[in-house]
């Protein structure tokens, strides 16, 4: 039982951490320390856990205690009965090799096509970030049912390295090899390590880190070009905006042929030879890839011939793309058509209105299911509201952790200033963007003017100073805009929308969201929906908000959505 825990500082964006567990008569004291490049340590968090039956732990000032799940009162709604979900795990008898399964996991988590994923290059050189690393770690442990892997080991490894690690772990599990996981430290070793940390002594020299990319690939086009270049030349470029080394005409021809095969459009080898960076090549590929989206709708699975099932429309998350719902499409039965709804600018009402005609067209005269992850759930609800009393029938709404904090976010100038200060600090620390908040403009012209200024700032900032291209900056701007719409929503606006709602709840919000809006640390079990929804089914998922669109959570989501569709018939 975790008795108490306290976070002294946020986890660093990068670098090393050391976790020390000290056994005592009452249980375990656990401390988490950040390790600088110089080897010094900083206490980030600490906690105490015990196996003793203590009953309800007493509140400790300044310490966050685990909160029990509410069983009555505001914010409570009963959980939906669990249903059996077929587990997506690797089967050695399936004929699929460890490498094939692993390449599929890594490529999907990092956004690469399997054919574009170089085998011998470090994942960090291919653009691996901390979120991708956690997604790969979780998927590998789930699919292969092996002991926990270290994210740092994945970060510095190539695909070939990870294949070896997993193959050895699988062999050990089957009794055919030596376990890869290091044994737990002895109590004496733990005490010695903790003493060193408490006294502030320098830890032994850390292994030298591999040099990462300058600007990592950020979208499907850049990943395809980056992976193709690395695979054929045998060396990853420093980054997509970095100057490319000279190559021979033969190598340029091979790159052009591979890209031509991948996108189905002839690419002249001269375009490869003349490219000073990967960006012009990515632009050519991007023009082709973007034709996959017709209008505002991405076809994840077209309606199969003879299908009479409702169409499922999944709306994009904040600042993102509906391509994130590909795993859900795989989890839904093959006779259910699945469409992704892409991002537009404008108010919530304006965006929803722009989607109506295409949703009507793709519905084929049958009922529709509207859903979305996070901000996408709000879009789904607004579209359902605008479809009320039309010829398009909405069967139900699926909300993938679309929630609001227990404590409403105040709509005051003081709170607005604090929010922009947090965003400015986040941008500086995470992206090296120095964006001083003009409080006078905020006071006189309001937040809309600030958003316009932010857009102009991101469009004119010197990329050479921070290594970020327009696509990355645009994603940050769009995410901020969408999340502000969600934060300011009053769910009561949809009180007249009387539809069944499936709410899939994560165990908690991720740290990045809590950093930008601390009130998301506390969310009612119903996410704020029971006040307006009579037919509300809540499905509890494992993992935080960012784990929702991946296995194993997405398997649970797919099973419940399919069950509800079957019940419609």
Image (spheres, rainbow, N blue to C red):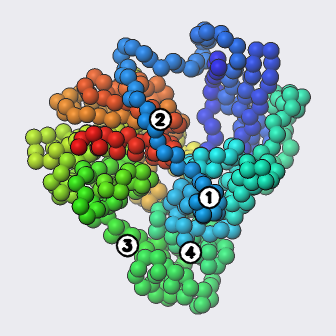
What residue appears at the point 86 percent right and 44 percent down from the top-left corner?
204
Mark 3 or mark 2, whichever is nearer to me: 2
Which residue is under mark 2? Answer: 541
N-term mark: 3 or 2:
3
Sequence-first disc among 4 and 3: 4
Q: Which quadrant, please, contains the N terminus?
A: top right
Viewport quadrant of the C terminus: top left
N-terminal of the two: label 2 or label 1?
Answer: 1
Q: Cα distance, mark 3 to mark 2? A: 38 Å
Q: Are marks 3 and 2 in contact (CB under 8 Å)?
A: no
Q: Is residue 9 left or right of residue 510?
A: right
**Residue 537's disc number:** none
Residue marked by disc 1: 93
Residue 189 visible (yes or no): yes
The spot of residue 46 in percent (x, y) is: 69, 25
Mark 2: secondary structure: loop
Res 228 label: 4
Q: Which residue is mark 3?
A: 287
Q: Is residue 474 visible?
A: no
Mark 4–mark 3 Cα distance, whole angstroms, equals 17 Å
Considering depth in this image, is 153 or 97 the residue closer to the camera? 97
Q: Mark 3: give few (<14), some (14-19) or many (20+) Cα within 10 Å.
A: few
Q: Say which residue appears at 57% left-offset and 44% top-offset.
A: 429
Q: Earlier in the sequence, mark 4 or mark 2?
A: 4
């Amino acid at each position: 039982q975790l008795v108490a825990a306290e976070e002294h500082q946020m986890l660093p964006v990068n670098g090393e951490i050391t976790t020390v567990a000290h056994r005592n008569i009452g249980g375990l004291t656990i401390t988490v320390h950040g390790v600088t490049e110089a080897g010094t340590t900083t206490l980030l968090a600490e906690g105490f856990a015990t196996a003793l039956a203590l009953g309800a732990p007493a509140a400790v000032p300044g310490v966050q205690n685990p909160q029990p799940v509410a069983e009555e009162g505001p914010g409570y709604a009963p959980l939906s009965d669990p249903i059996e979900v077929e587990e997506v795990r690797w089967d050695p008898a399936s004929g699929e090799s460890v490498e094939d399964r692993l390449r599929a996991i890594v490529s999907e988590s990092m956004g690469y096509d399997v054919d574009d994923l170089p085998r011998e290059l470090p994942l960090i050189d291919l653009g691996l970030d901390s979120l991708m690393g956690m997604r790969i770690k979780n998927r590998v442990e789930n699919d292969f049912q092996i002991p926990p892997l270290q994210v740092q080991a994945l970060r510095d490894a190539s695909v070939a390295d990870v294949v070896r690690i997993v193959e050895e772990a699988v062999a050990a599990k089957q009794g055919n090899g030596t376990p890869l996981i290091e044994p737990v430290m002895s109590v004496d070793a733990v005490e010695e390590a903790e003493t060193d940390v408490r006294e502030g002594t320098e830890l032994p020299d850390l292994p030298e880190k591999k040099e990462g990319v300058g600007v990592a690939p950020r979208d499907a086009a850049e990943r395809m070009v980056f992976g193709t270049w690395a695979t054929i030349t045998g060396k990853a470029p420093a980054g997509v905006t970095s100057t490319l080394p000279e190559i021979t005409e033969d190598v340029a021809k091979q790159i052009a042929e591979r890209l031509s095969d991948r996108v189905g459009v002839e690419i002249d080898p001269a375009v490869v030879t003349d490219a000073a960076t990967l960006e012009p090549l990515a632009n050519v590929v991007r023009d082709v890839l973007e034709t996959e989206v017709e209008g505002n709708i991405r076809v994840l699975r077209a309606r199969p011939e003879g299908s009479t099932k409702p169409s499922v429309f999944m709306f994009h998350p904040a600042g993102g793309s509906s391509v994130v719902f590909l795993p859900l499409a795989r989890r839904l039965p093959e006779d259910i058509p699945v469409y992704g709804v892409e991002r537009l600018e404008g108010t919530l009402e304006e965006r929803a209105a722009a989607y109506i005609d295409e949703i009507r067209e793709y519905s084929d005269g049958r009922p529709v299911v509207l859903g979305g992850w996070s901000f996408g759930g709000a879009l789904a609800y607004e579209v359902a509201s605008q479809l009320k009393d039309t010829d398009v029938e909405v069967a139900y709404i699926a909300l993938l952790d679309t929630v609001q904090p227990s404590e409403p976010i105040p709509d005051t100038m003081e709170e607005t200033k604090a929010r922009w200060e947090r965003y400015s600090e986040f941008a500086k620390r995470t992206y090296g963007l120095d964006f001083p908040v003009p409080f006078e403009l905020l006071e006189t012209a309001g937040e809309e003017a600030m958003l316009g200024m932010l857009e102009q700032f991101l469009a004119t900032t010197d990329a050479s100073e921070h290594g970020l291209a327009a696509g990355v900056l645009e994603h940050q701007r769009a995410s901020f805009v969408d999340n502000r719409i969600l934060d300011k929503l009053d769910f009561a606006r949809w009180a007249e929308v009387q539809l069944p709602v499936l709410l899939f709840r994560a165990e908690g919000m991720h740290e990045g969201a809590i950093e930008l809006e601390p009130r998301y640390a506390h969310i009612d079990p119903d996410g704020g929906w029971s006040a307006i929804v009579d037919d509300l089914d809540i499905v509890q998922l494992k993992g935080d908000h960012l784990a929702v669109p991946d296995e194993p959570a997405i398997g649970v989501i797919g099973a419940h959505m399919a069950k509800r569709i079957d019940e419609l018939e």
